[in-house]
């Protein structure tokens, strides 16, 4: 690190690198302060695999079309009211240019996957996943002369009258003051800060699994809020999916997610269903199941399927629990045997005739059940029976800072900070209030990372 830069980017994931590259390509001197060690750089972006993007015609990697209004309707359907529409529409419109921009900077793509993911028309998949994407960005940054400091924790921000003059960065136990003409905060949410989560969720946090990086502790987010930046989003709102309960507490990543929920039923420790497993296509619904499980006893649940759907979903990294009967399965899961048998029997009796089609919202549903299953309802009657234990897996939190369409941070008095920008998870709450669309976090990070980097460079270079 030098003592002064045109632009300092706080964070080391997708949004941060998009900002750093955009600023450097406009002639600014740039420092990336990444709190993680080099081998774990990249935040939650390491665990990603695709980006949702608008397109008006088929491409080599995307089928058919996915236009602005459909994209926005999908977002509004999962996130509800209260989103910042100008920001959301800017993210959607500029997503159309992300693929080409990324390709020029070394990112490669692959054809999307088939089956229950339903993403062949909407999402651009990275060849090699998120880590390959980050490696391409870091190689490009090194080639352009971006300075990167690893194990570099920002422990102080000098914010006066809405402007950030300098940062205090701790590396190896020593704290250095770094002056900056402009600052981009892209340091993620607070999902790895268990104490902060406990303030919101109480002791339920003991049952949570943190899917992503352990370095997203919300330290810089807290500094911004304490400095008077206007908050946005519900502290309890988050991207939370159902993951295998056997997953590690931290950094398990995408492979711990279970994609078979729409194909079976989910019960809690009492052996009772509590949610509509077939409410919507999985990429528009999966991020609500973490919160549903979090509200169950001991933050634990189980997805139960039978032999009819074996092989119809992305395989889990952990093997299923298998039994020859529902009673035997209940015993292995330590669930009330009679209750689970009754739950399965009631579900089977409520299943209506229909044609199963995993690629669309089919007509297979239940009737007379609470809760109903809206789609993909099939009787669970073909042994062997399988189950996976579930825990809530927190990916990232939606509490963040308000920004304008130029990614400039907004202070509590409504004043726009002249040289302080935010991108990625730390500002995603402007657009995501609840629920999630698969790949949309990467869209937000890429679009607003580029916007923030351009704006920071323009401010610094004058």
Image: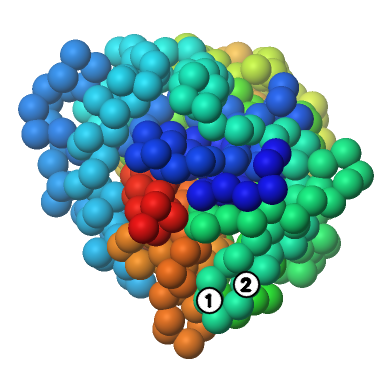
Q: Quadrant of the C terminus?
A: bottom left
Number of the label disc, if any, that sits on residue 114 = none
Residue 450 appears in which quarter of the rendering? top left
The percent position of residue 120, horizontal first and vertical second, equals 27, 23
Which residue is identified by label 2? 159
The percent position of residue 140, horizontal first and vertical second, equals 46, 21
- Element type at marker 1? loop
Residue at point 50%, 57% (across, down): 182
Q: Quadrant of the N terminus?
A: top right
- Horizontal arrangement in the rendering, residue 173 relative to residue 189 (left or right): right
Which residue is identified by label 1? 162
Residue at point 44%, 43% (across, down): 28
- Element type at marker 2? strand
**Where is 383 relative to 151, above or below?**
above
Q: Are marks 2 and 1 in contact (CB under 8 Å)?
A: yes
Residue at point 42%, 83% (across, down): 414
């Amino acid at each position: 690190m030098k003592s002064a830069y045109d632009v300092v980017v706080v964070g080391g994931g997708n949004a941060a690198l998009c900002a750093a590259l955009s600023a450097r390509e406009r002639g600014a001197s740039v420092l990336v302060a990444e709190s993680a060690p080099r081998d774990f750089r990249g935040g939650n972006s390491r665990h990603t695999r695709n980006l949702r993007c608008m397109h008006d015609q088929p491409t080599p990697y995307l089928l058919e079309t996915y236009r602005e209004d459909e994209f926005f309707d999908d977002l509004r359907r999962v996130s509800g009211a209260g989103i910042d529409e100008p920001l959301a529409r800017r993210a959607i419109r500029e997503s159309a240019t992300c693929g080409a921009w990324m390709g020029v900077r070394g990112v490669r793509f692959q054809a999307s996957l088939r089956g229950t993911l339903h993403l062949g028309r909407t999402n651009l998949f990275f060849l090699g996943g998120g880590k390959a994407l980050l490696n391409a960005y870091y190689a490009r940054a090194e080639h352009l002369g971006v300075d990167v400091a690893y194990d570099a924790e920002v422990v102080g921000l000098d914010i006066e009258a809405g402007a950030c003059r300098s940062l205090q960065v701790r590396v190896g136990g020593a704290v250095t003051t770094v002056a900056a003409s402009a600052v981009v905060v892209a340091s993620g949410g607070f999902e790895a800060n268990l104490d902060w989560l406990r303030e919101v969720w109480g002791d339920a946090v003991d049952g949570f699994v943190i899917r992503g990086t352990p370095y997203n502790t919300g330290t810089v987010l807290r500094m911004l809020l304490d400095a008077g930046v206007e908050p946005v989003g519900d502290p309890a709102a988050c991207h939370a999916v159902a993951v295998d309960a056997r997953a590690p507490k931290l950094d398990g990543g995408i492979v711990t997610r279970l994609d078979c929920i729409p194909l079976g039923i989910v019960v809690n420790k009492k052996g009772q269903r509590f949610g509509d497993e077939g409410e919507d296509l999985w990429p528009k619904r999966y991020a609500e199941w973490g919160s549903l499980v979090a509200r169950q006893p001991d933050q634990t649940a189980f997805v139960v399927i039978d032999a009819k759907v074996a092989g119809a979903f992305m395989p889990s990294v952990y093997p299923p629990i298998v039994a020859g009967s529902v009673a035997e399965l209940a015993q292995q899961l330590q669930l009330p045997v009679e209750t689970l048998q009754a739950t399965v029997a009631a579900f089977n009796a409520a299943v209506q005739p229909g044609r199963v089609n995993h690629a669309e919202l089919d007509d297979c549903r239940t009737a007379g059940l609470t809760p109903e299953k809206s789609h993909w309802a099939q009787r669970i009657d073909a042994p062997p029976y399988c189950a996976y234990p579930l825990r809530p897996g927190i990916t990232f939190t939606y509490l963040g800072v308000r920004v304008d369409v130029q990614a400039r941070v907004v202070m509590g008095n409504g004043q726009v900070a002249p040289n302080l920008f935010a991108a990625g998870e730390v500002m995603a709450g402007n657009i995501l209030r609840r629920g999630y669309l698969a790949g949309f976090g990467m869209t937000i990070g890429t679009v607003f990372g580029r916007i923030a980097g351009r704006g920071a460079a323009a401010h610094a270079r004058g």
